[in-house]
Image (cartoon, rainbow, N blue to C red):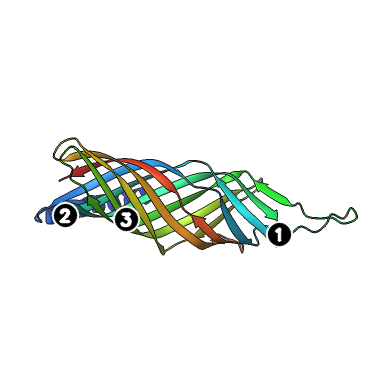
Amino acid sequence: MRIIIRLLAMVLCVLFVKGAVAQFSQLPGNVYVKGYSGISAITDKKIGQELVAPTGYVGEISYKPGWLSGVAFGYRYKSWSIEMAWDYRRNGHSHVIFSNENPPPPDPFLNTLPQRIKINSGHSAASLLSLNGYYNYDIGSSLEPYFGGGFVWVNDIRVVLEGVNEERIYSADNFMSFQFMGGLNISINDNLALYGEIRYLGISNIDMSQKRGEGLIVNLDYEPFSLVVGVNYAF
């Protein structure tokens, strides 16, 4: 049954895009579709917590290089472009450390908590919808610089902590953010272009609740820089 539903959804998407292209083709510009992928990097981030680690412990997430992939459907008129895009991104964790920044003095007669709790496995991921606008510079060659920005609807963002015997998922969803990008189009012919860009995504100060649990990750900043390459086909 799920396979049938997915096939129907794919057919509906194809019909929608086909109809949209037919409608937009009447306008004095170009409809285009894009596919892209790339790598992303995130600097280490401090996080707060409630019921994730002992009271008073502060966390830090250290990220591995990650990846992203996405698709976009847009319209260009002269030097301006506007598009709707969806992408998914994921970065593994090098480690997550919770530490007690104000530990009590050691007492050999009492059982004390460790000053640091380290989790070596896990990842962070996000599913995003965005409305982006671009300005393209025509410099009279096959190379065309551009810059842009967009409003981002965060459909889902999550942090997954993988312990020895269990996996904990903390997530937030359905809120607005923003991104900026700049890059270079390389025209192959009248319809086809390749491009590369640098992209910054700004998601800050979010609180994430635990799936099937009571813990919270609070005040998380998720701000990846991404290097993206893609293909643009204009109809």
Q: Dividing the picture into quarters, in which one does residue 197 lie? A: top left
| Secondary structure beneath label 1 | loop
- Please name the amino acid that badge 2 sits on: Gly
Q: Which residue is mark 3?
A: 149
Instruction: Please report the residue visible at 38 percent of the width from the left and 55 percent of the height from the top.
Output: 128
- Please name the amino acid that badge 1 sits on: Pro
Which badge, 2 or 1, comes first in the chain's sequence? 2
- Please name the amino acid that badge 3 sits on: Gly
| Secondary structure beneath label 3 | strand
Query: Closer to the camera: disc 2 or disc 1?
Result: 1
How many numbered tags mark residues here? 3
Query: Closer to the camera: disc 1 or disc 3?
Result: 3
Position of 34 relative to 133 (above/below)? above
Instruction: Please report the residue visible at 45 percent of the width from the left and 58 percent of the height from the top.
Output: 203
Q: Which residue is mark 1?
A: 54
Cα–Cα gap, marks 2 and 3? 27 Å
Cα–Cα gap, marks 1 and 3? 40 Å
Specify the farthest residue to the front.
Answer: 139
Mark 1, Cα crowd under 10 Å, few <14 / some 14-19 / many 20+, is some
